[in-house]
C-alpha cells in the first residue's frame, strides 16, 4: 500500500456482545494499531451502497448471510440520516432453530394448561412441529413494506439462496451492485477515509456507529 498502517476502523455484527467487543479491542491493541472506530456491519454496508447509488429516503432491509452468521437488519434513511430500526440474527441460525423456539413456547403453554403427556404421541408431536413451522412462515417479514433489500455476505451467492430471495422479495428490490463479500469492508474504508479527512459522507446517529477506542476496554 506504500504507507504504514497505524489505525483501523473495524466492522462488527450488529448484535456483537460486549465480551466479544472487548476481545476484539485487545487483539487490535496487541497488533499495534489504534482503533479509530467500531461500526456495525449493516451500517457499513449501507454506507457502501449509498456511495455507489446515493440512496434516497427509504426503508431498507439488509440481509447479511455470511459464513458464520445470519443478520437481518431493518434500516431507515431519512433526510440523509441512517438509523437501524430493528436487528435479528444468530451466530448459528437455521430454519429449524426458529421451528424449535416456537415449538418450545407452545409446549410450555400447553403443559401449564394440561397434564397430558404430549411427548408420548409421536404423531401429535410431528403435527405440532409442522404447525409451528407454518406459524413461523406466517410471522415472516412483511416484504412489501421495504423499498430496498441489500444482500451482503458470500453465502448470498448460493443459487438456491438467491432464488428464494427473488421469490420472497422480488428481483427489482434486490441489490447486487457491490460485491457482497466486499460491501462491509468498502463501507468501513469509506468511513475510515471520512475520519481522516473530516468529510461527512452520510450522517449516521452515534448509537449506530460504535465510537469505542482501544483504551476503553472495560
Image: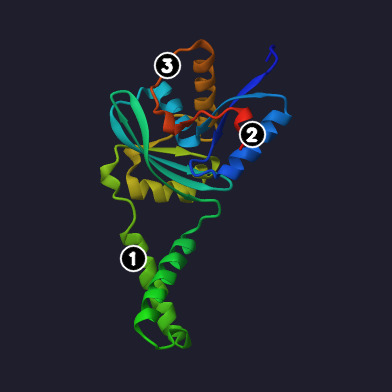
On the image, the x and y values in percent for residue 133 come to 39, 67
Which image quarter: residue 31?
Answer: top right
The residue closer to the viewer here, 78 or 129, is 78
On the image, the x and y values in percent for residue 99 come to 44, 66
The residue closer to the viewer here, 172 or 53, is 53
Precedes in sequence: disc 2 or disc 1? 2
Residue underneath mark 2: 25
Crowding at dot 3, Cα within 10 Å, few <14 / some 14-19 / many 20+, comes out as few
Query: Where, quadrant-wise, is the C terminus in this rendering?
Result: top right
On the image, the x and y values in percent for residue 208 come to 43, 33
**Which disc is residue 200 wearing?**
3
CA–CA distance between discs 2 and 3? Answer: 25 Å
Give the residue drawn at x 51%, y 42%: 157
- Mark 2 near mark 1, Cβ–Cβ under 8 Å? no
**Which disc is residue 63 wearing?**
none
Identify whether 87 is placed above or below 123.
above
- Mark 1 near mark 3, Cβ–Cβ under 8 Å? no
Residue underneath mark 1: 135
- Mark 2 near mark 3, Cβ–Cβ under 8 Å? no
Amino acid at each position: 500500500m506504500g504507507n504504514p498502517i497505524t489505525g483501523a476502523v473495524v466492522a462488527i455484527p450488529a448484535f456483537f456482545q460486549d465480551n466479544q467487543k472487548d476481545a476484539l479491542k485487545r487483539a487490535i491493541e496487541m497488533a499495534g494499531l489504534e482503533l479509530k472506530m467500531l461500526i456495525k456491519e449493516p451500517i457499513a454496508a449501507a454506507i457502501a451502497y449509498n456511495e455507489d447509488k446515493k440512496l434516497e429516503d427509504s426503508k431498507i432491509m439488509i440481509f447479511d448471510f455470511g459464513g458464520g452468521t445470519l443478520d437481518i437488519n431493518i434500516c431507515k434513511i431519512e433526510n440523509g440520516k441512517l438509523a437501524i430500526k430493528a436487528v435479528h440474527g444468530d451466530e448459528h441460525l437455521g430454519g429449524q432453530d426458529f421451528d424449535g423456539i416456537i415449538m418450545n413456547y407452545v409446549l410450555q403453554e400447553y403443559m401449564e394448561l394440561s397434564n397430558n403427556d404430549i411427548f408420548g404421541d409421536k404423531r401429535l408431536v410431528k403435527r405440532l412441529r409442522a404447525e409451528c413451522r407454518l406459524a413461523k412462515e406466517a410471522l415472516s417479514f412483511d416484504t412489501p413494506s421495504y423499498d430496498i433489500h441489500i444482500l451482503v455476505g458470500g453465502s448470498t451467492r448460493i443459487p438456491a439462496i438467491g432464488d428464494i430471495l427473488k421469490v420472497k422479495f422480488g428481483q427489482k428490490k434486490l441489490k447486487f451492485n457491490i460485491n457482497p463479500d466486499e460491501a462491509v469492508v468498502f463501507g468501513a474504508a469509506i468511513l475510515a477515509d471520512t475520519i481522516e479527512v473530516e468529510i461527512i459522507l452520510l450522517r449516521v446517529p452515534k448509537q449506530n456507529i460504535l465510537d469505542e477506542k482501544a483504551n476503553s476496554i472495560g
